[in-house]
Image (cartoon, coloured by chain):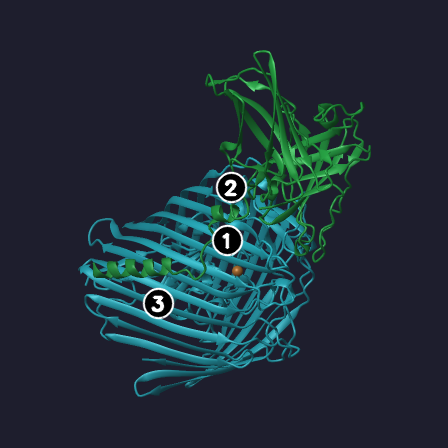
Chain colours: A green, B cyan
Amino acid sequence: MRLLHLYVIAVFVMVVSCTIDKTDYEAEISTETTEYIDFEEATSITSGDYTISIEALNGSLYKGYNELRLKITNTQTNVDLENSEVAFLPIMTDANGNKVSCPHEYNLPFDATEEYYKGYAVFTDESDTTVSWQLYIGFVDNDQSYMIDHTITVEEQTNLNLNMTAFTGNDNEQYFIALVSPQSPNVAENDLVAGIYKYNQPTDPSGTFPDPSQFSYSIVQNHTLLLDPRMPEPSMGNHSSPNNEDLTQQSDGLYHGVVNYTMTGNWTLNFILQDENGQTIKGTEVSTEFTPGIEGEKSELYIDILF
Amino acid sequence: MKRITLAILLLGIFANAQNTPIKKDTLNVVLDEVIVIAAKKKKIETEMKMAVSVDEFLASSDNISFIKRGAYAWEPLLNNMSTERSTVTIDGMHIFGACTDKMDPVTSYVESNNLSDIEIKSGQEGSMHGATVAGSINLKRKSTSFGLNKKWNGGYQTGYEFNNDQFFNLGKLSYSGDKLVVDGSVSYRRAENYTDGNNDEVEHSQYKKFNASLGVAYKTSPLSSVRVDAIFDKAKDVGYPALPMDLSLSRALITSVAYKRFFEDGPIKVWDTKIYFNAIEHYMDDTTRPENLVHMDMPGWSTTYGLVSKVNFKKDDYASEVQLNAYNNLSIAEMRMYPQDRSERTMFAYSWPWVTTSYAGLSMSNSLDVSNISQLNFGGTLGLNYNYSKYVEFNWIFHPGAPQKKTRFLPNIYASYQLNMSGFDFSVGGGYGHRAPSVSEGYGYYIYNSFDRYDYIGDPDLKNEVSYEVNASAGFKNKRASIQAQANYFYIQDYIIGRILSTGSPMNYQSVGVKGYTSLDYATLFNFSLNGSYAILQDLHWKGSLTYARGLDENKNNLPFIRPLSYQTSLHFSYGKFGFLTSLNGDLKQVDYSPEYGEDETPAYSNWNVSADYTFFIKDHKTVLQVGAENIFNTYYSTYADWGNIPRMGRNVFTSLKIDL
Ligand SMILES: [Cu+2]
């Protein structure tokens, strides 16, 4: 059976000696994106007898949408504060000293099963030498109100799949769209989730800082976000994908739709935001023509992603 | 010496009626007790040229036509149907090309000097090796017999063709001992660009091909033997003028181990089992085409392993073969597009998302001599076909929720009746069979077809293609003349073809839209051929043939790649050691073309060819020298099946020399 030996060796040599390696698809997909699924402590604030721990994905706060989990502990009794009225307000101070906020959940509900206060913030800028972010957190314990403030660091969003955009709508209101999911898309049908928010223009003059009425944001209700994904790369000639679904609001308040990515690379999500009556708030239709060599035109409302 | 004659089934008169290039006597393999591995002295050569490529040899068969994308690796169409509808095997082994653009039909991985003959079966009679609609093409490798008187045999062939500066060297050597047999062959061909009938060079039509084969057989007992075979094929720098890409490298390793056992007594005559493995790598290259807007890498891999085991029975007037066929193939094709700013992220997708095809089939073919002049052939296959798409999310983009795994049941049956009396022969037959969609048809993803300029998308949920077939032939033969007419008709239900999709936009920049593989309700195909020969004088022979085909879809629109009325006529004259041949062949105008599938009307053409050969002896070695010319009038033409209407070769003077060692 020496022949068989030789045969096996020959086959083996041939099979392992492919001149071009096959692509490792899982690695290919994750080169530009990292998926974070674990909540870790992003910051911890101690003030008086209380410690507030804020957890976020990967233990960092990024520009864009951040889901947040808060725990308030009385360090004296070592007891977690449950079912308190917790208020949460992020404030950004820019180079000129202007103070603005960003879309956020102001009153944080308590999740009794998971035992934390749940909220979110859509940070509109990363912290740097001129931009700083401050968190103002208020809570009530034993009928006593507490207010704590703390500087946080908002990091640059390196994952473009969690990109966001802020714009002024045709109704002169300020809107924000932030991508929530997928963090790491596939060449596949992807469930696309985005949060759409609006700044509530204050009607009363400002009270003492921080006056929540000056920094009020709300979730945009019952709108529709029309979707047209395209590859902007000139050689892709305005390539698009089939079977996409526009984003509509679901019970979690977020907007859900379906985006198909036909290959990896740069994609532009072209949007048109329409209100419940079908009136366009922002966005333009883009050409559906296949134009090889010409960079794809974008809607006036879009978010670029990359994976 | 007790002789066992094995009538290989399905064949006999009917195969003769198919007018394949196989002579009838080769179909009845006479197996000697000693000659364990059947030796067949069948030459791979055409009447016109003695040194032909596998493609040129196949082209000499009536029911084979070709889609040509250049000078190399023509895609054989059997009964005017593309390769998805036929099974192409090497000694019964399944091999699948690794190119999404069909640059590498199985026939491109062998060379004429390692083949003994090519067995073509039309329609369901070809289902022995696996489910088919059009039929089967089985490339048979050379295998020398044990214990020949002449222990060492060999041959060497060299030649030069002027049009494309083609130079080839083919060598083979065999050793035949009582216990051991070794067959080896090596060949190398290289060609530059050819020139068309206007004397213009057809760019990107060059190629280089190296092929080597080795077979070693060992006799384990007087009635049994083990044989190990390997073919290594490497093509480099192959141009495809009709495609937007060329081939930088294609490599194939085709290996098998076979055990064969004969039985002296009883109805079981021979049991032959083989396990095999083959791996193909295919790397396309577009750096030769700087005009391309997008640089792409498109590598492909195809790996197959399998088993063929067959038993032959014979008792009185009844002979039968039972065959078990199982294989597993993994097809992978990638595409990576480079943005114009190369620092940007590349764009990646699978055009074959790691598609596994497993097939297991049990086939049986029987022949019964009803009387001295008539024979009944019948048989069938029960097959199970399983597909698995590893990255099924690619398929979901166009077919949300399509299953990742798909099992199909593929039955095939046929029967034919033959009558042969006083020079006349007649046959009628029918068949019914299913085939599963190919990897591209089922799971292909943005496969660019440069013929109709659409990107093609597979559909995992396609139905089986179901063929209903009838065939008939009639002929007459005497010492001087022969005439044979044959016809077949296919009614193919759920005929798979690409249709424009309203969704999706092209991915390849040359593309104009997206087509999805869909099933037509049905399509019909009719093939007819007429052959004649006449010995005008003892040394002057005439041969002629005429073929006609028509293919229609459910709306009575033409199907693509159906050969128009074509003819071939030749005269052969021999005078002593000299032989002369002249032939004329051509197609009439392609009237029934299919604009829907990217075809335009192809005008008529005809080609006139001549050749002369001289046979002499160098010592004891028979030597043949041949000189000839194809397309003598340097006609500028392209045929109905020339991809993108690329022109065919203009006048080509060829020379070759063959020495038997
Ligand atoms: Cu290829």
User: Is there any visible trace of residue B48 in the rendered image?
Assistant: no
Q: Are marks 1 and 2 on the same chain?
A: yes
Q: Look at the picture and state if B338 lies above or below A197.
A: below
Q: Local crowd at mark 1 within 10 Å, few (<14), some, or many (≥20)? A: many
Give coordinates of residue B381: x percent, y percent: 40, 44
Numbered circle sitting on residue B333: 1
Residue at point 41% right, 45% down? B358
Q: Quadrant of residue A171?
A: top right
Residue at point 32% right, 58% down? A12
Which residue is more in the foreground, B160 or A161?
Answer: A161
Q: Local crowd at mark 2 within 10 Å, few (<14), some, or many (≥20)? A: many
Q: Look at the picture and state if B395 lies above or below A99.
A: below
Say whether disc 1 or disc 3 marks the residue closer to the N-terminus: 3
Q: Give the Cα separation between the discs numbered 1 and 2.
A: 14 Å
Callout 2: residue from which chain?
B
Mark 1 vs ligand 1: CB below 8 Å: no
